[in-house]
Image: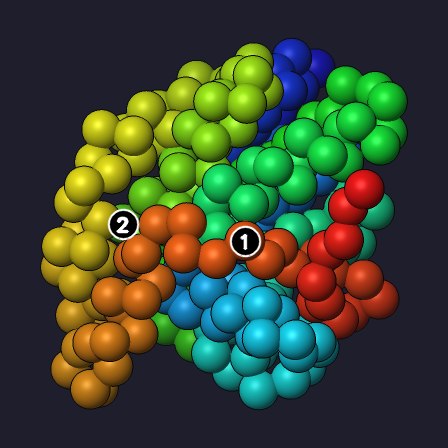
Amino acid sequence: MSFDDQSTYQVRAEWGVAGLRRLAPADIVIVVDALRFTTTVTDRVAAGDVVPLDDDAFAVSINGAVVAAAAADTGAIVLAGSLRNAKAVADAVLAIQHERAARTSIAVIACGERVSRDSAEVRFAVEDQLAAGAIISALSDLGIDHTSPDAAVMGEGARALSRACVHLFLASASGRELVEMGRRDEVVSAATRDAIDAVAILRDGVFEALVTN
């Protein structure tokens, strides 16, 4: 056992592809790239679309799509998570666990931001920390609360800062960049917690709406 694989916990958390690889294999991987890949994918799926990884959504973020592809290669169920559907993602995980009739391990991967398009180095991203934490806290509210220390810090931090999400998204490095590009409304929308019930699942390279019993 590696000390950083978090395998003794049901809910785990890490950053980027490197973090995904450090963790023990999980039954479900929740990819979180809040500005803007997983938010865009979730909104499009909610509108009835399907989103291939090689679609225009890939250009929205080189981080989220890469992490999603790496997660799919592990054989896990891959879900797109955002602040806009944090509770819906938690509900979907609980439904999947019931369908499997077995304890289900969950890895929540905050994608972060690459330092540059040509670099594999990932920097901390406020928006991904908050969105990943919101999903973890929603899981805890459902009783899926055997969390690693990494996940617990994310979850409780997001819970404490839940009323400040719009401000923090706008003030983040990614948010400021998008505001400068004239996309302030997109940042505010991405920071709206539990605005939609849709959950996107990755199947054969395509995100589509998850339907659970």
Please tell me how crowded label 1 is: few (under 14), some (14-19), or many (20+) other residues with Cα within 10 Å.
Answer: some
Task: Report helix, strand or loop for mark 2.
Answer: helix
In-image side of 9 versus 193 (left or right)? right
Task: Report helix, strand or loop for mark 1.
Answer: loop
Residue 9, quarter of the rendered image: top right
Q: Would you say residue 60 is visible in this rendering?
A: yes
Comparing labels 1 and 2, the label whose residue is closer to the camera: 1
Residue type, mark 1 in image: Asp
Q: Is residue 184 above or below residue 174?
A: below
Tell me the number on the disc at residue 197.
1
According to the image, label 2 marks what residue?
126
Residue 152: x and y, percent? Answer: 41, 21
At 76% from the left and 28% from the top, the residue drawn is: 97
At 49% from the left and 41% from the top, the residue drawn is: 87
Residue placed most toward the observer, 185 or 9 = 185
Total numbered badges shown on the rendered structure: 2
Please tell me how crowded label 2 is: few (under 14), some (14-19), or many (20+) other residues with Cα within 10 Å.
Answer: many
Q: Disc 1 versus disc 2: distance between alpha carbons? A: 23 Å
Q: Is residue 153 above or below residue 70?
A: above
Q: Would you say residue 41 is visible in this rendering?
A: no
- Mark closest to the chain's N terminus, 1 or 2: 2
